[in-house]
Amino acid sequence: MSSSFVAYIDESGDEGFTFLDDGRGSSRWFVLSAVVYRRPADLSAVAALKAARATLGWAPKKAFHFCDMRHEHRRVLLNEVAKTPFRTVSILS
C-alpha cells in the first residue's frame, strides 16, 4: 500500500550538549520539522524549488541552506514555496 503523503524532514540544533553559564555553547533546543504534501501535490514542491533557483540564477542542483542565504534569497524561496499546498509539523525538545 503506498502512502498518501510525502514529508520533507529536517532538524536543527546541536547534539553537543555543551551549556555554558554565559549562554554560549549548544542550543538548548532540538527542532525536528517536516513540510508535508499530499502525494498528488508533491511535484508542486519540486516545481517551487526549481522556480526559486531559476529566479535566483542558481544552478539546478544547488542546495538551499537557509543559514547561508541572504534575506532577499530567502524571500524568493519562501514566496515560491508559499504558493504550494503544504502543511508543517514541528517538534521542539
Image (spheres, rainbow, N blue to C red):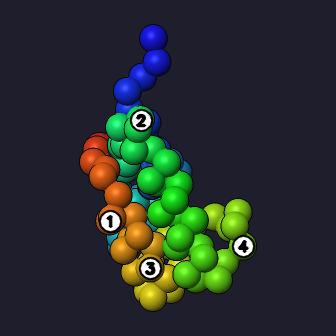
| Label 4 Cα crowd, 10 Å radius (few <14 / some 14-19 / many 20+) | few
x and y percent of residue 75 in the render?
40, 80
Q: Position of residue 56 (x, y in %)?
A: 58, 83
Q: Which residue lies under the disc numbered 1?
A: 82
The picture places residue 9, in percent across and down from the top left corner, at: 46, 44
- Specify the amino acid type for callout 2: Arg
Among the two numbered marks 3 and 2 on one chain, the one whose residue lies closer to the N terminus: 2
Which of the two labelled residues, at mark 3 and mark 1, occupies the earlier sequence position? 3
- Label 2: how many residues lie within 10 Å, few (<14), some (14-19) or many (20+)? some
At mark 1, the secondary structure is loop
Left or right placement of residue 85 versus residue 81 in this view: left
Callout 3, which amino acid?
Val
Q: Secondary structure at mark 3?
A: helix
* Cα gap from disc 3 to disc 1, whole angstroms: 10 Å
The residue wearing badge 4 is 59
Mark 1 vs 2, N-terminal side: 2
The label on residue 55 is none
Quarter of the picture containing the N terminus is: top left
Residue at 41% x, 70% y is 80
